[in-house]
Image (tube, rainbow, N blue to C red):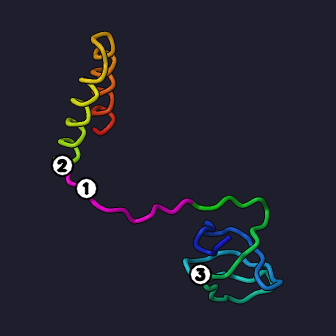
């Protein structure tokens, strides 16, 4: 596991010593003292620590462009389903739009 995947306060072993993560690049040893932990370091998490999920930076999307693409997709889908499926497709479209608000 990599250091940036650990939550603040998580305990781990590195180079035979036990540490607790105290910051984005630092950890405190159980024997005392602080240490910088390189991002590339392979760590062994202790106490069944789960990884912290860090959002990855993403690209920004233009709302109007996304809605135009979705509307085009919806029109294509409407042409592919029969009349009985269009009602369900329209309901799914409304749920999708409502979820974005």
Disc 2 packing (10 Å; few <14; some 14–19; many ≥20): few
Q: Which residues are magenta?
A: 53-62
Query: Which image quadrant is residue 98 in?
Result: top left
**Residue beneath disc 2:** 65
- Give the residue furthest to the front: 80
User: In the rendered view, would you say 51 is above or below 20?
Assistant: above
**Direction from residue 44 to residue 66 in the image, left or right:** left
Front position among marks 2 and 3: 2
Front position among marks 1 and 3: 1
Residue 98 or residue 20, whichever sits in front: 98
SS under mark 2: helix
User: In the rendered view, would you say 51 is above or below 23?
Assistant: above
Disc 3 packing (10 Å; few <14; some 14–19; many ≥20): few
SS under mark 3: loop
Alpha-carbon span between mark 2 and mark 1: 8 Å
Disc 1 packing (10 Å; few <14; some 14–19; many ≥20): few
Residue 76 or residue 98, whichever sits in front: 76
Q: Are marks 1 and 3 in contact (CB under 8 Å)?
A: no
Q: Earlier in the sequence, mark 2 or mark 3?
A: 3
Q: Residue at x 64, y 85 (%)?
A: 37
Chief SS of the magenta region = loop
Q: Position of residue 34 (x, y in %)?
A: 67, 88
Res 61 label: 1
Q: Is residue 7 a member of the stretch shown in magenta?
A: no
């Amino acid at each position: 596991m990599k250091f940036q995947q650990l939550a603040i306060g998580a305990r781990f072993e590195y180079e035979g010593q036990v540490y607790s993560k105290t910051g984005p690049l630092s950890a405190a040893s159980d024997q005392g003292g602080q240490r910088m932990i390189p991002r590339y370091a392979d760590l062994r998490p202790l106490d069944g620590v789960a990884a912290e999920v860090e959002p990855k930076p993403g690209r920004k999307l233009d709302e109007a462009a996304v809605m135009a693409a979705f509307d085009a997709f919806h029109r294509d889908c409407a042409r592919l389903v029969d009349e009985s499926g269009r009602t369900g497709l329209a309901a799914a479209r409304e749920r999708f739009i409502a979820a974005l608000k």
